[in-house]
Image (tube, helix red, strand yellow):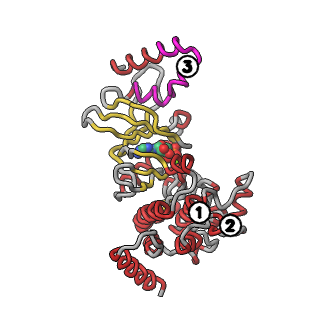
């Protein structure tokens, strides 16, 4: 246990005794934090928790050797004993490491460290990533509600580019949602993260997903964002499923509301399959018609009617006006329109 650990533990104890109502939980304590502090002492110093999802807890930490900030995702403690979950986490790390793109969060390393303390047999599985300084799209929408047309279009374009790249490598993300999109304050880019349930098409049924009983023909994902074919567990999911989720995201960014809401996951899935959403233009009357039409195209029930690729979606997005006129942007739009016409012909 490092001096750092002793100091922070001491500070927590002191504060808890000064403010009895603020116990360890109130101080941001978690079993994952305690294990990272103990096992990675000397290598990393945790600054604070950045967020958590169904699989992991993510910390902002300082890499003490390289002297830089990183994000460390730790497999949740309740899953650490499960070889299936550890394999799933390894798979996320491998997929992320293989995808090197400006709008996909970069991985530095993945490790399973032995916890040397007595009585702790479980390895600490952790993924060290680039720290994306900013906030998640979920946090942004919680604070600001609907986003303006320019911001929506920029975020959709960044994500469509990232998806196009992943899809060309045969990887379908399957869990696109605001919590898994980070907005980088430095570059202004939207970054895709959390490939925890991604599907590698080329590996087919022999990949780790299938071993977990979650092959492409079993529903996984987050119901509010799942494509009709994902809801019905179709066997051959492809990138167009992610483009549907991107359509849901676009609808939510422009209108401040999801296209479908229902009390149960089953009811929600049935709506994705059979119910048409309220026209987006009604829910976002000031939005540009071309952008609205592009988002609604992504929300088509039949995937054959959606944009075929992320690149095609980007070309369609580029034809929506930005709200400002300039000769350069006009020329870019003419070129983009020609590209769309070429793609569609
Ligand atoms: N590289 C990162 N930089 C900054 N924050 C991050 C980073 N990765 C994840 N987060 C935060 O942690 C949350 C959970 O991470 P995520 O990978 O989605 O975990 P899970 O697989 O458990 O859903 C995200 O919603 C985000 O708020
Ligand atoms: Mg997540």
Label 1 secondary element:
helix
Q: Residue at x 54, y 72 (%)?
A: 294
Sequence-wise, the earlier of marks 3 and 1 is 3
Magenta region: 13-38
- Res. 277 mark: 2
Q: Residue at x 55, y 46 (%)?
A: 143
Pointers 2 and 1 in contact (C-beta within 8 Å): yes
Label 2 secondary element:
loop
Q: CA distance from mark 2 to mark 3?
A: 46 Å
- 107 over 300 or under it: above or below: above
User: Residue 222: x percent and y percent?
Assistant: 60, 53
Depth check, mark 3 against mark 1: the one in front is: 1
Q: Residue 30: within the magenta?
A: yes
Out of 245 and 166, give the one closest to the viewer: 245
Q: Main secondary structure of the magenta part?
A: helix
Q: Can residue 237 be spotted in the picture?
A: no
In the picture, the quarter occupied by the N terminus is top left
Out of 292 and 172, give the one closest to the viewer: 292
User: Residue 248: x percent and y percent?
Assistant: 59, 62
User: Which residue ends up furthest to the front in the rendered image?
Assistant: 325
Q: Disc 1 marks which residue? A: 251
Q: Residue 67: within the magenta?
A: no
- 163 over 195 or under it: above or below: below
Sequence-wise, the earlier of marks 2 and 1 is 1
Out of 152 and 262, give the one closest to the viewer: 152
């Amino acid at each position: 246990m490092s001096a750092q650990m002793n100091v922070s533990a001491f500070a927590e104890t002191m504060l808890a005794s000064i403010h009895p109502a603020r116990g360890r939980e109130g101080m941001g304590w978690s079993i994952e934090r305690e294990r990272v502090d103990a096992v990675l002492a000397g290598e990393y110093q945790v600054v604070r928790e950045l967020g958590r999802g169904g699989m992991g807890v993510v910390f902002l930490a300082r890499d003490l050797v390289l002297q830089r900030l990183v994000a460390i995702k730790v497999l949740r403690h309740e899953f650490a004993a499960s070889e299936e979950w550890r394999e799933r986490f390894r798979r996320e790390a491998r997929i992320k490491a293989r995808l090197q793109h400006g709008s996909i969060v970069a991985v530095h390393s993945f490790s399973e460290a032995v916890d040397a303390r007595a009585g702790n047999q479980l390895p600490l599985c952790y993924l060290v990533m680039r720290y994306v300084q900013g906030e998640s799209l979920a946090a942004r929408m919680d604070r600001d509600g609907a986003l303006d047309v320019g911001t929506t279009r920029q975020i959709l374009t960044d994500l469509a580019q990232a998806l196009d790249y992943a899809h060309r490598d045969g990887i379908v993300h399957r869990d696109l949602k605001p919590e898994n999109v980070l907005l980088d304050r430095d570059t202004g880019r939207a970054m895709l993260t959390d490939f925890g349930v991604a599907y590698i098409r080329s590996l087919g049924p022999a990949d780790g997903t299938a071993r977990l009983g979650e092959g492409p023909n079993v529903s996984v994902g987050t119901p509010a964002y799942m494509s009709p074919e994902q809801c019905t567990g179709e066997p051959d999911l492809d990138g167009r499923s992610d483009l549907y989720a991107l359509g849901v995201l676009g609808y939510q960014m422009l209108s401040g509301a999801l296209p479908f809401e229902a009390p149960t996951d089953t009811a929600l899935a049935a709506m994705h399959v059979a119910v048409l959403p309220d026209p987006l233009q009604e829910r976002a009357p000031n939005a540009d018609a071309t952008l609205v039409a592009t988002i609604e195209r992504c929300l088509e029930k039949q995937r054959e009617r959606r944009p075929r690729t992320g690149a095609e979606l980007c070309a369609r997005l580029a034809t929506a006006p930005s709200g400002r006129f300039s000769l350069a942007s006009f020329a870019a739009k003419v070129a983009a329109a020609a590209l769309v016409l070429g793609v569609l012909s």
